[in-house]
Image (cartoon, grey):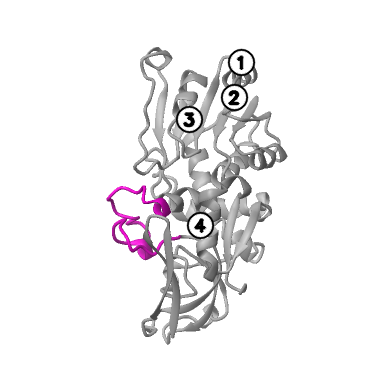
Amino acid sequence: MKACTLFFVAPGVVELREALLPVLAPDQVLVETIYSAISPGTEMLVYRGQFPAMPVDASIESLGGEFHYPLAYGYAAVGRVTEIGAAVEPEWAGRLVFSFQPHTSHFVASPRALFLIPDSISPEQACFLPNTETAVNLVQDAAPILGERALVFGQGIIGLLTTALLAEFPLESLVSVDTFPRRRAAALALGVSAALDPAAPDFRAQAASILASGADVTLELSGAPVALNDAITLTTFSGRIVIGSWYGEKRAALDLGGAFHRSRLKLISSQVSSIAPELSSRWDKARRFGVAWQALARIRPEKWITHRFPLEKAKDAYRLLDENPQETIQVIFDHALE
């Protein structure tokens, strides 16, 4: 059987390649993909060739190797098990599963690399599992406290999921920041105190008036290194700045000669592939995924799907994200479309 897989082959160029799938081993299953979600922050760095020479993600079996072209990439696939190996438990047959897989029509995997989708979660919702786990990780690293003032830069899908989780806390104020009106409107629907445009001439003054002496905790999730300077300016003495953006090869020119030097700010790097050391004695990935599934059921992020493409129209999907990102929030590949 052949699978059709998306490859990034050069900056701004993607193509589909067909290849024979390996023969199913006794302990493996065959999965037919139903949906796969584009993670625009990371995938646009790959699409634009802005990734550094480093391993893709050693913690995910299907994403081994280095960042270099040609690269099959993606990590949010939902599908149905259509065939099982002789040694696989029969109950896996026909089950809906999630997997960290590149964008592809079919794939072979071990059940240990799959997540059974709970009955309470739709296949569309399940596409958001990895970004929801990331949001859970970001909130755990931010560690918000009762009555704090919080500021979130970036309201892409990870930013919105993070804002949705923070909105559940009894904070004094929660301010979101994004350049795109559509995303600011989505944040307002979550109940933020304000959704601000960082391009506004009086942006810092607006934020300061809401945050009083400054944000106790700030999360930089915009993917724009320039936002770090705004974060430094708007975070209060001894506040925390959680940096969840991956900038790839984009450089961050920071103003550390002003308020930062005396403010005792804490810059915290946050990445979902590991558990924060201070939590790792009590938390593991399984526990965090359990929290993420519960958050998916509460937040229902499928409302943020703005575009659906068949895999055959992948060029159009990435061109849209590259040229008109203001029109999008979440773009998915719907493998039932033609």
In this rendering, would 234 be left or right of 305? left
Residue 92 image position (x, y, % from top left)? 52, 78
Q: Amino acid at mark 4?
A: Tyr
* Residue 10 found in image quarter: bottom left
What residue is disc 4 on? 318
- Mark 3 is surrounded, within 10 Å at the Cα level, by few (under 14), some (14 to 19) or many (20 or more) other residues, namely some
Q: Are marks 2 and 1 in contact (CB under 8 Å)?
A: yes
Check the image and report above or below for 113 versus 158: below
Q: Nearer the viewer, residue 106 or 291?
A: 106
Residue 113 image position (x, y, % from top left)? 43, 67
Q: Nearer the viewer, mark 1 or mark 4?
A: 4
- Mark 2 is surrounded, within 10 Å at the Cα level, by few (under 14), some (14 to 19) or many (20 or more) other residues, namely many
Q: CA distance from mark 2 to mark 1?
A: 9 Å
What residue is disc 1 on? 212
Secondary structure state at the residue bearing disc 4: helix
Secondary structure state at the residue bearing disc 2: strand
What residue is disc 3 on? 227
Q: Nearer the viewer, residue 188 or 324?
A: 324
Q: Nearer the viewer, mark 2 or mark 1?
A: 1
- Magenta highlight on residue 186: no
Residue 244 image position (x, y, % from top left)? 45, 39
What residue is drawn where x is 41% and y is 84%? Answer: 87
Q: Are marks 1 and 3 in contact (CB under 8 Å)?
A: no
Q: Main secondary structure of the magenta part?
A: loop
Q: Amino acid at mark 3?
A: Ala
- Magenta highlight on residue 48: yes
Q: CA distance from mark 2 to mark 3?
A: 18 Å
